[in-house]
Image (tube, grey):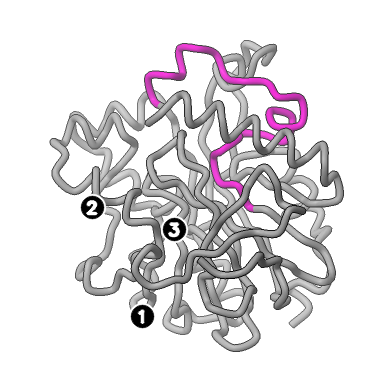
Amino acid sequence: MGDNLEVRTEVQLNLMTAGYCTHREWLTIQGGSFGSVRFPAMFAYIEHPRLGTVLFDTGYSERFFQATSAFPAKLYRWTTPVYICEEETAAHQLRALGVPPERVQKIILSHFHADHIGGVRDFPNAEFYYLRTAYRPLQDMSTFRATKAGFLPELLPDRFGERSRPIEETCSKISLNEGYAPFTEGYDLFGDGSVIGIDVSGHAPGQLGLLLRATGQEYFLCADAAWSTTAYASHRLPKPIVKWIKADWRQYKDNLHRLHVLHRQRPELRIIPTHCREAEQRYVLGSEIKGDARRG
């Protein structure tokens, strides 16, 4: 393991939304309303100074509906209603920014739930970076167990294994400097300190978050380690019944606590959960990230 490292190479960052699902808020956070609320499926479009376009997840695509058209996968659609159209997909939005899907060379996957891998088939030349511990448990699952785990294998592209670059085998493990405590280690994904992967398992096995710097500001894209900014800022867990869909409840609680501590110690660090409506309003709809891809 290398010397203590901080994020040191700046990238351009653009946060976008590819569809959303709805769920009862009271299940997802203590004190939430009984109403059904919208959970955006955000993804990140990153422009790296050397590698070009990099994506972090892809959100949903319309393939979700085909993949959940029969039992038992249809249970996924019933319990978590999804809304997505072609114009909202990652590929369509990138084309509108002048980035053909064929140009995307690298996609980092936080984990393998359908709201994170729904659009990966649209990027035929991409290599996939993920923690092997995120994918290995899914490979031999029955259809029912895979559905319970939120995994729809039909969403993955052909030759997925050949195009995979498991992070544990291809990236250097590093120690982080004390400014990121209680997170102490990660992976230097591209060997230049630009994008640092952090294991935030619990919601899913091998779930990956990203530390990066854009326009002088540091960001921690924490995937589903929290479902909202309120959850980590006020340290509010989901209802206990949610244990049923968490891969490891103890890990989930531990990493939510770590996010809470990091936020208290580093309030200037922008911690962004994938499904946070407040974050979507601020960074996607409000375009608060200055100097983003829309300016290019």
Q: Give the x, y percent position of residue 273.
A: 63, 43
Please tell me how crowded label 2 is: few (under 14), some (14-19), or many (20+) other residues with Cα within 10 Å. Answer: some
Q: Give the x, y percent position of residue 200.
A: 52, 44
Mark 3: which amino acid?
Leu
Q: Are marks 3 and 2 in contact (CB under 8 Å)?
A: no
Q: Nearer the viewer, mark 3 or mark 2?
A: 3
Q: Element under label 2?
A: helix
> Is residue 139 at all visible to an observer of this figure?
yes
Residue 244 located within the stretch drawn in magenta: yes
Please tell me how crowded label 3 is: few (under 14), some (14-19), or many (20+) other residues with Cα within 10 Å. Answer: many
Q: Earlier in the sequence, mark 1 or mark 2?
A: 1
Residue to which mark 3 is pinned: 109
Residue to which mark 2 is pinned: 154
CA gap, disc 1 and disc 3: 15 Å
Residue to which mark 1 is pinned: 125
Residue placed at 34% from the left, 76% from the top? 124
Mark 2: which amino acid?
Glu
